Image (cartoon, rainbow, N blue to C red):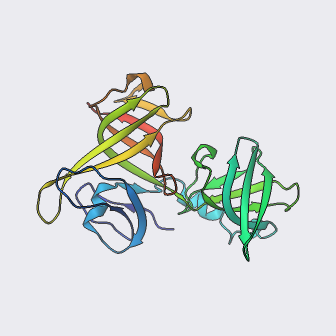
Amino acid sequence: MRKLITGITGLALLVGVVAVFQPAPSQASDFDAEPGRGMSAMTSWVNAVDVHGDKDGNSRYSKSESNRQYVKVNGKVTAISASSISVDVVKDGVTTAYTFTIDSATKIIRKFKGIASLTEVLVGDTVRVYVTSLTGGTAKLIWDKSIWWVTLSGKISVLNATDKTFSLVITRKEPQTGLPMTLTVPIKANDATTYWQASTAKAFTDLANDQTVNVRGSWNAVVKVVVAGKVTIKS
């Protein structure tokens, strides 16, 4: 897997992430990022894809000799906790439910095989789970194909301290017309999220509406939300 870094104003290199939205001036729209090959002016909305852990993630992918001994289960997550994952597998119209143990040795990787954390895996995600056994087995590797890493910059709106959520409002010029366009991205923080202002550690309570922030986190294509790993207050 080759890393992708796109500039704030540049085009994508190698593998792109395209923000799909209705190109109407000053109109908020849903963030519907999808991976795609080639170059697109829209990729300037998204600044990075799985920039951490790709090398390590690849070593834990299915071509690894150590993973060939495990059973591969492809399905959708129906439940996830610190100690177990439940997956529904549909084959020939029949759904089979499996539950596997998660322990301290379980590894999680994203769609592009960057190293992930368990907090990024959500109900509804499409996964491939490498397990020791279909019955009473332990998950050794969870490959979540519904998530990938992004970096975004914009202004906070609709801040909810109770749910630890906010919307990130990103404003850019439409490439063809030069008119302003607004993209609204739902952000979800959790206990693993860190907050910074310059080199000073902050907390969720330091966030406020209309602040300009950078958000690095895991975009989930199923629930259409970014699970924030790091929020940096810019102004």
Task: Give x and y (percent) for residue 114.
Answer: 55, 57
Residue 209: name its quadrant.
top left
The reply to whether residue 105 is visible in this rendering is no
Which residue is at a point 39% across and 42% down the rendered structure image? 215
In the picture shown, does residue 68 fall above or below 198?
Answer: below
In the picture shown, does residue 107 fall above or below 35?
Answer: above
Q: Is residue 171 left or right of residue 135?
A: left
In the picture shown, does residue 29 fall above or below 155?
Answer: below
Residue 125 or residue 16, whichever sits in front: 125
Residue with the most extreme right position: 135
Which residue is at a point 48% across and 56% down the rendered structure image? 50
Residue 157: name its quadrant.
top left
**Where does the C terminus fall, quadrant-wise?**
top left
Task: Give x and y (percent) for residue 198.
Answer: 34, 30
Which residue is at a point 28% across and 69% down the rendered structure image? 40
Task: Give x and y (percent) for residue 140.
Answer: 75, 56
Residue with the most extreme front position: 93
How many labels sit on residues? 0
Residue 158: name its quadrant.
top left
The reply to whether residue 42 is visible in this rendering is yes
Q: Is residue 166 left or right of residue 7?
A: right
Q: Is residue 196 left or right of residue 193?
A: left
Residue with the most extreme top position: 205
Task: Give x and y (percent) for residue 162.
Answer: 49, 26
